[in-house]
Amino acid sequence: MNETLAFVDSSGMPERVRILDIGADEPHQPGSGFRTRVVRLEDGRRMLQRRLLPAHALRAESLDVLEAEIRAGLTLIRAFREVLYPPEFTRLAGYAIEVEAPFLLLDLLREGQPMAEIARGLVLSTEQKKFESSLFRALRLLEWAGLVHRSISPATVRWDGARVQLTNLGSADRAGRPRQRLGALPWASPEQREGIGTIDHRDDIWSAGQLVYFVANSRESSGSRMPPLAGPVRDDLLRNVFAEHAGQRPDARTMLRRIAAPDPWDDLGRPADPLQAGRKHFAELLADKGPLAWPIPSAVRQPDPPEAAAPPRADGEHEPGTAWPRRRPRAGGTGRWGTSHRRAEEGG
């Protein structure tokens, strides 16, 4: 295969790589101009290529979606540059816009399935809290990056039994920008459906609450209000999540507290340790050496006893050869580091 792929990687550097193998297109939604397939490059990398078909490349709305996904991917990479990239999100590897069929490249998705494909009712109750913790952790991380997903649903959230992965970032936008009409019941919040006000992190809280309801009850909710859920635990978790206005809903941090899950922001806010890798390597070397890592200390020689003090002379000085200072401190002095007797080299 002589086809090559020219693109810009996520750091902004141009690449041109020969393709060794192209996989079949994955199933797509009717009417969508995007096709997704796996490509294997000559350097061994396997990536997910999400491309826009030529017939849709001239449509402004399709290009907007592609560019929004690229912007969101770059925003996440830059936001988490100093830490490990969160596995809760797909990772942008490269993109090309000024071509006949614009595309982006993503790292391969983790193992798992979209929630829409998981048989309803098969998520064990013991997994539900783990799912909820991971989901609201992902929203907290999005908040750190200043992004709002705006399309959280069973089709865009994957689950591998341990951690979620948010996909399809083509609808993501920065918090604080004017809302546009997007989504429908039950997944989109009232303000988002109507396109009023500005984008808020708690728009995603509404959608995530709907997904929690979907997992817990094996069905979508109907209408804009939630019926009572089974059990007081989940009722308490979703308290005020479906309030009419974003300002009345809890944020992701509050949701994590309700399920006693750690806040990832606590770790993100700590300064990075530039010596972390070196410290880890040093600890591994010590562990390999075992007890021989440290030399056996030699016997410590006891200091000789001080010479006997000679009686002071009348002028306050001691005889030469004694172990005591030649002059007694002045009465009322503040000592070596005092302000009234500073040394000359200190500027006193």
Image (spheres, helix red, strand yellow):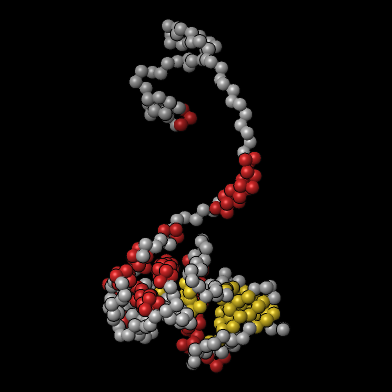
Residue 339, position as x, y percentages in the image = 38, 29
Rendered-image quadrant of the N terminus: bottom right
Residue 53, position as x, y percentages in the image = 56, 89
The foreground one among 109 and 266 is 109
- Is 313 located above or below residue 286 in the figure? above
- The answer to which image quadrant residue 107 occupies is bottom right
Left or right: 138, with 44 as reference point: left
Residue 312, position as x, y percentages in the image = 45, 8
Residue 64, position as x, y percentages in the image = 47, 84
Residue at (48, 16) in percent of width and height: 325
Q: Is residue 199 visible?
A: no
Residue at (53, 12) in percent of width and height: 307
Left or right: 340, with 81 as reference point: left
Residue with the most extreme right position: 2
Q: Is residue 256 visible?
A: yes
The foreground one among 263 and 53 is 263
Left or right: 216, with 1 as reference point: left
- Is 265 located above or below residue 154 in the figure? above
The foreground one among 252 and 246 is 252
The foreground one among 291 and 297 is 291
Residue at (62, 38) in percent of width and height: 294
Residue at (39, 28) in percent of width and height: 338
